[in-house]
Image (cartoon, helix red, strand yellow):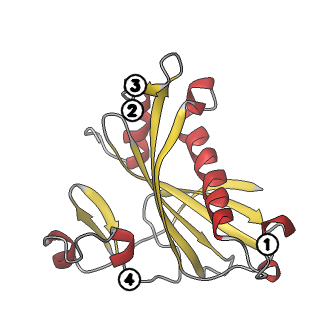
Amino acid sequence: MTSQVRNIPRSNLRTLGGEERVGAPLSEWNDPDPHPGRSLLQTRPRRTRATIARPMHETSIRIRWRDMDAYGHVNNAVYLTYLEECRDAWVQTVLGSGGASWDFVLAHVGVDYRRQLTQSDEQIVVRCRLASFGRSSIRTSEEISLPDGTLVAEAEAVVVPRDPSSDRSRPLTESERERLRAELGTEEKG
């Protein structure tokens, strides 16, 4: 597995509720939800190449034989493992590799599967970037693609810092917020 951070351009980045989103024209994202009850991932148009403007953490992963299911393709649950591998590496890169960076738990994940993977695909590229952060949560935008850029899956995740002594969520520290602001490339609070 190899990891690196890259800048990948995006021309159609839009905002919704203070968070940057991908896809449709600005007028569609600023209007009330056109699809109540559906996730934003379900309403985004399909893409075939990674095109996000902010730095993204990128991890290359070989498809393992154990990832296959009886139908001859990568099991859908394994996609979550691929995303987790990249997200964990991103957290380590952005927040440091100290013990506190492991005190984050996954609170939510949503995945849109765009294409099946098989053993013959051999390798995938998983990307993760910071979408936004709040008082006690971090939202990431993630994707899985083939090395040629063909989009395989898109995902959104929310991770929450936890206090190991109480095993409950905690607010982000000022140091964590500073690093996240730097990752967003902003001076204001997330």
Q: Quadrant of residue 66?
A: bottom right
Residue lying at 55% horizontally and 73% vertically, measured from the top left: 153
Camera-nearest residue between 38 and 179:
38
Q: CA distance from mark 1 to mark 2?
A: 41 Å
Circle on res. 87 = none
| Residue 11 visible in the current orientation | no
Distance from label 1 to label 4 (Cα)? 28 Å
Q: Secondary structure at mark 1?
A: loop
Kindly indicate the quadrant of the structure image that contains residue 69. bottom right
In what element is the residue under mark 4?
loop
Give, as a three-letter code, the residue at label 4.
Pro
Q: Which residue is mark 4?
A: 45
Mark toward the viewer: 3 or 2: 3
Q: Position of residue 138 (x, y in %)?
A: 41, 44
Furthest toward the top, the residue is 165
Residue 21 position within the rendered picture, expressed as x and y whole percent measured from the top left: 32, 66
Which residue is the site of mark 3? Answer: 173
Q: Are marks 4 and 3 in contact (CB under 8 Å)?
A: no
Total residue callouts: 4
Percent x, y for residue 139?
40, 50
Q: CA distance from mark 1 to mark 3?
A: 40 Å
For label 4, the crowd category at 10 Å Cα-Cα, with few meaning under 14, some 14 to 19 and many 20 or more, is: few
